[in-house]
Amino acid sequence: MQYEISQQGNSTVLQVNEARFDAKLAPEFRNQIESIKEDLSENLILDIESVRFMDSSGLGAVMGVYKLLKDKRILVANAQQPVLDLFKLTRMDRLIKTYPSLDEALHVAV
């Protein structure tokens, strides 16, 4: 999985640099978050601007991380329309809020 992690204020930003977030990427994503969970800030922002496709495995991995990090807030930034549609269709947008830009997610995370 190609990604970048940065610290911005009280948020850890994980920028996923993959076009597809599917069954191939999902286990690695979850394992990576699990390995760094102790170092995460109170907010985890998933910047998924590069992700053009997400399947149920990718969505399941995000949900698994949501459950794993129950003491932290998870936000999604820069989701493309097909990914937003998936979040809305599955009602995941009620649990994990999505924002059109990283700046907006960071503003809310203050």
Image (tube, rainbow, N blue to C red):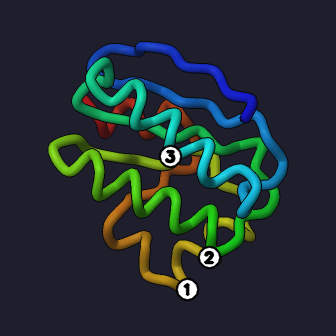
Q: Amino acid type of disc 1?
A: Leu
Q: Give the percent coordinates (x, y) of residue 75.
A: 40, 47
Residue where numbered disc 3 is placed: 30
For disc 3, the neighbor class at 10 Å (few under 14, some 14 to 19, many from 20) is some
| Relative horizontal placement of residue 81, taking residue 89 as reference (left or right) | right
Closer to viewer: mark 1 or mark 3:
3
| Relative horizontal placement of residue 32, taking residue 8 as reference (left or right) | right
CA separation, marks 1 and 3? 22 Å
Which quadrant holds the N terminus? top right
For disc 1, the neighbor class at 10 Å (few under 14, some 14 to 19, many from 20) is few
CA separation, marks 2 and 3? 19 Å
Q: How many marks?
A: 3
Write the residue at 32% across / 67% down.
95
| Relative horizontal placement of residue 58, taking residue 95 as reference (left or right) | right
Contact? badges 1 and 2 (CB < 8 Å): yes
Residue where numbered disc 1 is placed: 89
Of 105 and 17, which appears nearest the observer? Answer: 17
Q: Give the percent coordinates (x, y) of residue 49.
A: 71, 43
Which quadrant holds the C terminus? top left
Q: Amino acid type of disc 3?
A: Arg
Mark with earlier residue (1, 3): 3
Write the residue at 79% across / 63% down.
53
Q: Circle 3 — which element?
A: helix
Residue where numbered disc 2 is placed: 86
User: Is residue 19 depicted above or below 44 in this figure?
Assistant: below
Q: Amino acid type of disc 2?
A: Leu
Closer to viewer: mark 2 or mark 3:
3
Write the residue at 42% across / 70% down.
93
Contact? badges 2 and 3 (CB < 8 Å): no
